[in-house]
Amino acid sequence: MNAQGGPCRSGCAAAALPERGFHMKKTVPAIVAAVALIFFLSCASGAYVHEWTDAENPAAFTPGAAPPIAAEIPVPAPPVAAVEPEPPSARRYLERGIAFAGQGEFYAAMRDFTEAARLDPGLADAYLWRGFVRFGTGDMDSATVDFTQAVRLNPGLAHAHAWHGLVRFEKGDWSRALADFTRALQLEPKDALLYAWRGSVHSSLGKFDRAIADYTNAIRLNPDFANAYNNRGVAYHEKGNLDRAIADFTRAILLAPDFADAYNNRGLAHHGRGEPDRAVADFEAALRINPAHPHAGENLETVRSAQ
């Protein structure tokens, strides 16, 4: 319960969303990125990933914003043979690094990406992939260096702009993150995940109309994007449009029946409309799915105590 005695909102990890006296869950890019990273590492086409792909896994996202993407899924590259000692090839090290990364051997992958960059300092993909892995292991500062170098070497590499923006978002540098995502979208205008990530930046800046527009574009490109529906619902809730918020949370639940955060959020919207019974039912559903949900239990207790 918050200081005003109402249900509590969790907000996004770096959120600047106004406190409304309740806990709402919105998917933040870092959580989505973890899923996207796993997908990238397992679906490389050739030496590197050419397109973002649709690999949504709503259960992996806590709040509810953005998963992976509408695009054709590239055929995973076959395992690459061991690097032959002679002659050394940057591309071969890059390919083997991608294979290691896809198997979860992240430190072996980083060694190969580093060797690829040493052999060919102009190979932007080596820095991009090493940045992916460093991000996934939590080394944000080193990932920033790699993404910056990848952009310098290949300014048309949309993924490098996007992940650079993601690191900036995690550090609370929302203005520059916004610029990075916008540049990435100029290069990849049909990438649903990029719209969802930029929507999260707009939401963090309190620009809910722009956030709604970006989430809507993400949904247009990927109609099964449950997290985009959930996050758009959060933005509608922040604007006081509870009917649209409930419609979006309901759609997210239909697409992902185990989406505990969407139930929690819909319960908050029902509470806001003066529908305590429906709110209680949604909070209970969230707790059945995730008994350790960080806010549904508190929200349930708060609503029950007011009945």
Image: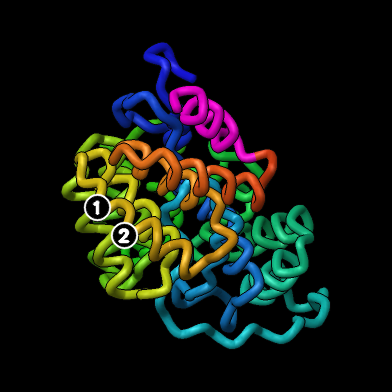
State the extent of the magenta-drawn residues as a range.
Answer: 293-307
Question: Residue 125: x percent and y percent?
Answer: 52, 66
Question: Residue 238: x percent and y percent?
Answer: 26, 38
Question: Residue 254: x percent and y percent?
Answer: 46, 68
Q: Residues within 10 Å of mark 2 (few under 14, many from 20)?
A: some
- In the picture shown, does residue 205 fall above or below 229? above
Q: Amino acid at mark 1?
A: Asp
Residue 161 appears anywhere in the view: no
Determine if the magenta segment contains residue 298: yes
Determine the residue positioned at 52% across, 66% down: 256
Task: Please say if the residues under marks 1 and 2 sit with CB atoms less than 8 Å apart.
Answer: yes
Which residue is tagged 1? Answer: 243
Determine the residue positioned at 52% across, 59% down: 128
- In the picture shown, does residue 228 fall above or below 220? above
Query: Residue 51's image quarter?
Result: bottom left
Which residue is tagged 2? Answer: 247
Q: Residues within 10 Å of mark 1 (few under 14, many from 20)?
A: some
Q: Amino acid at mark 2?
A: Ala
Residue 238 appears anywhere in the view: yes
Query: Residue 97's image quarter?
Result: bottom right
Q: Secondary structure at mark 1?
A: helix
- In the picture shown, does residue 198 fall above or below 129? above
